[in-house]
Image (cartoon, rainbow, N blue to C red):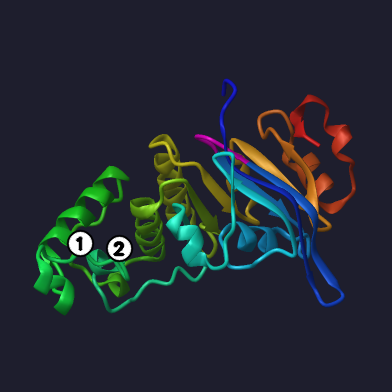
Amino acid sequence: MNNPKIVMQAKNISKRYGQVTALDGADFELLDGEILAVIGDNGAGKSSLIKVLSGATIPDSGEIMLDGKTVHFHSPIDARRQGIETVYQDLAVAPAMTIAENLFLGREILRPGFLSKFFRLIDKKKMLQEANRHMQDLKIGIRSMQQSVETLSGGQRQGVAVARSAAFARHVIILDEPTAALGVKEGNMVLELIRNIRDKGLPVIIISHNMPHVFEIADRIHIQRLGRRAGVVDPKKVSMSDTVAVMTGAKQPADLGDGLLIA
């Protein structure tokens, strides 16, 4: 990447829960057109950091910037209004509803006209067309958008949840453990879907414990440790074992040489 733009940035983020410090002056940067993996041991603060970035948690102090402008999120809805979409591990899909209905859940397309808005007359034909277009754009191979989600495999359900986010995100997509509990084939399908989203110009943040997947897909890896950023590394220049060693405290970030991008 040649001088890529910083799309999202967090500076000196702190969050305490009583006597527990979840984030202790944490910093974060997401670059335009990248897949950034966030890794960390249990209690490192990675989930707290992602909740702050997605609007689910209000930090005690610090600053969040989007395209260089300071933003304040008081809820996930505020983050969504800024074009940030998050897919949590539980997916939040409605199994009995169709794929098209899930894609537009809570954001249904209404028919034109005043009465339609008053009586919420949903344009099912338009939603079906748009659902087909989104799924084809992301190369998700599902036969019919009128299938109920409960008929899909785990990987296909993940695909629906990710496609829903991609349909509405303008700035960032955040994926929490996107390949957890999936088999090899379905996990690879989801990784390819993430690449397709990145290739269409949307930067992606993934939180994952699956280190082989992280090293396969990430352009950069953010290591979270003890409530703050230990470093950002280049997975092409740093081994998986060295990355894990920094994550657990067995090695110092400075030991990584030119593979350490940000200390």
Q: What residue lies at 63% left-to-right and 67% top-to-bottom? A: 57
In the image, is residue 222 above or below residue 228?
above
Residue type at tag 1:
Met
The verdict on residue 31 being magenta is yes
Q: Is residue 142 visible?
A: yes
* Residue 29 screen position, x and y as percent: 65, 41
In the image, is residue 172 above or below residue 258?
below
Tag 1, which secondary structure?
loop
Viewer-closest of 13 and 237? 13
The residue carrying mark 1 is 145
Which quarter shows the C terminus? Answer: top right
* Residue 208 screen position, x and y as percent: 62, 55
In the image, is residue 32 above or below residue 159?
above
Region in magenta: 30-34
Which of disc 2 and disc 1 is earlier in sequence?
2
Viewer-closest of 153 and 43? 43
Determine contact: label 1, label 2, CB under 8 Å: yes
Quadrant location of residue 226?
bottom right
